[in-house]
Amino acid sequence: MKPGIFRVMGCIVLVLIVSGSSGRTEPLAATRLTPDEIKWEREPSGVQRASLVGDDKKPGMYTYRVRFPANHKVQPHFHPDERVVTVISGTLYVGYGEQFDESAMKALPSGSIWTEPARQPHFVFAKDGEVVFQVVGSNGPSGLTRIEPKQP
């Protein structure tokens, strides 16, 4: 088999594991979306978000996309649930920890993934331009807890 097949098979296994282990009370609905059918909503910060599958405010699996404008930074924070994130376009810089530290960030270009274990502090930066990424959560409801910077 070609190496790309292993990646596809791994993604399928991940989706099956995630959907099978969720606390979903309703079955996953059959959904097909083309890029032009995705409905983006703009937040006051300039970030855009599009819900694709499920609802991160309810029990169960969910998927959404986020579009960061160039130079958008998200300070350290964490989520109560596990997530797998894929960079769709652009390059996003991602770091783990309770302090924003640009030197500790890794550049993740289009096609890259990172994980956000439950309660794992992390921070991100769209340093080089616009970035679009997709979040798959294993078991909502989700949320975001900001980490206040430590004072010297």
Image (spheres, rainbow, N blue to C red):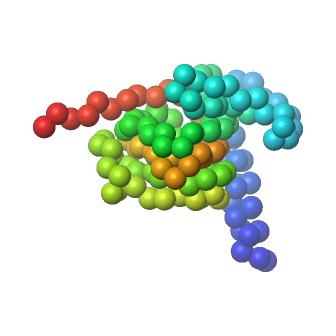
* Residue 139 visible in this rendered orientation of the protein: yes
Position of residue 37 in the picture relative to residue 11 (left or right): right
Q: Residue furthest left?
A: 152
Position of residue 38 in the picture relative to residue 122 (left or right): right
Q: Position of residue 107 (x, y in %)?
A: 48, 59
Position of residue 103 in the picture relative to residue 115 (left or right): left
Q: Position of residue 59 (x, y in %)?
A: 62, 25
Q: Position of residue 60 (x, y in %)?
A: 65, 30
Nearer to the camera, 136 or 123: 123
Q: Is residue 131 above or below residue 10?
A: above
Q: Quadrant of the C terminus?
A: top left
Name the residue at 84% across, 33% down.
Answer: 37
Name the residue at 52% across, 41% down.
Answer: 82
Q: Is residue 1 above or below residue 85?
A: below
The total of numbered circles placed on residues is 0
Quadrant in the picture for residue 77: top left
Q: Position of residue 140 (x, y in %)?
A: 58, 29
Position of residue 30 in the picture relative to residue 11 (left or right): right
Q: Residue furthest bottom?
A: 1
Name the residue at 48% across, 39% down.
Answer: 72
Q: Quadrant of the N terminus?
A: bottom right
Name the residue at 64% across, 31% down.
Answer: 49
* Residue 23 visible in this rendered orientation of the protein: no
Nearer to the camera, 9 or 124: 124
